[in-house]
């Protein structure tokens, strides 16, 4: 793997960035890694990978079993620091719980991070589904209803850049892979104020999303409901879920704006 060298500049600490790359090299397909595997995954040489692993072990973010290294639960503190400081999450979560009880389907709040959406609130319904994302999970923005809502809050040039940097993959036969068509859908969804994803990520699964606004009508998040086509039709998902989704979004948006106003006055 080739390492991308970032020129040193004021405020940039290359060693810290490389240490974070070591943490990110662990995942579902590589929960435990040897020194050689970490070096290969990060583009570091063995000596550098060893220094970072030993440092992370010393501060409690990594543990060692034989020749393999594993992340420890302490890594969760890094993500929790972000979530606990995120007003959107604390404001939205109780509203999302009420929404799930009302529609009896799973619901989420997500934000845009690069080319992906990241779930910051996820409340599942008591049903078995193949896709079961949790808080912190990522999905591509280009083929998700929440992603298209969030991209709709960007200027056209920024949307084009996100799509250019996205790895466009056909997850199902329904996945739209034309960047021009995706741009058209984003614009159409922005005009009507909601987005419907029809089985583009998983067969049989539809999702409906609406925007959440902060100050100055800036889109700060997306609220969605996921429906299973084995239980309901696409038109029923819109007619049954959209009014509830819009009411919940208005409640969250009102609270976000109120908190932003109170913060600006303090």
Image (cartoon, helix red, strand yellow):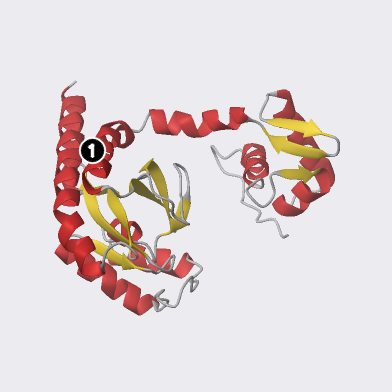
Q: Residues within 10 Å of mark 1 (few under 14, many from 20)?
A: some
- Dividing the picture into quadrants, the one containing residue 123 is top left
Front in this rendered view, residue 103 or 41:
103
Identify the residue under disc 1.
98
Determine whether, in the image, residue 177 is placed left or right of residue 226: right
Residue 56: % across, % down: 70, 31
Front in this rendered view, residue 218 or 26:
26
- Dividing the picture into quadrants, the one containing residue 3 is bottom right
Residue 92: % across, % down: 27, 37
- Is 176 situated above or below 119? below
Determine whether, in the image, residue 17 is placed left or right of residue 56: left
Residue 213: % across, % down: 20, 46
Mark 1, secondary structure of its residue = helix
- Dividing the picture into quadrants, the one containing residue 63 is top right
In which quadrant of the rendered image does the C terminus lie? top left
Residue 70: % across, % down: 72, 37
- Is 74 situated above or below 121? above
């Amino acid at each position: 793997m080739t390492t991308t060298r970032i020129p040193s500049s004021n405020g940039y600490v290359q060693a810290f960035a490389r240490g974070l790359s070591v943490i990110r090299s662990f995942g579902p397909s590589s929960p435990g890694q040897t020194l050689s595997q970490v070096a290969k995954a990060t583009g570091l040489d063995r000596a550098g990978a060893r220094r970072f692993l030993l440092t992370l072990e010393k501060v409690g973010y990594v543990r060692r079993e034989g020749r393999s290294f594993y992340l420890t639960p302490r890594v969760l503190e890094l993500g929790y620091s972000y979530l606990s400081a995120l007003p959107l999450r604390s404001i939205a979560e109780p509203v999302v719980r009420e929404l799930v009880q009302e529609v009896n389907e799973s619901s989420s709040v997500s934000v845009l991070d690069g080319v992906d959406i990241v779930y910051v609130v996820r409340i599942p319904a008591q049903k078995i589904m193949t896709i079961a994302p949790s808080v912190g999970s990522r999905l591509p923005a280009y083929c998700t209803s929440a992603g298209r809502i969030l991209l709709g809050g960007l200027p056209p040039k920024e949307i084009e850049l996100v799509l250019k940097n996205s790895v466009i993959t056909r997850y199902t036969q329904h996945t739209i892979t034309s960047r021009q068509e995706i741009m058209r859908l984003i614009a159409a969804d922005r005009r009507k104020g909601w987005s419907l994803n029809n089985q583009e990520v998983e067969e049989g699964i539809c999702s409906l999303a609406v925007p959440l606004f902060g100050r100055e009508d800036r889109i700060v998040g997306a609220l969605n409901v996921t429906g299973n086509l084995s239980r309901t039709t696409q038109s029923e998902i819109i007619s049954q879920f959209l009014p509830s989704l819009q009411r919940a979004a208005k409640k969250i948006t009102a609270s976000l704006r109120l908190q932003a106003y109170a913060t600006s006055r303090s």
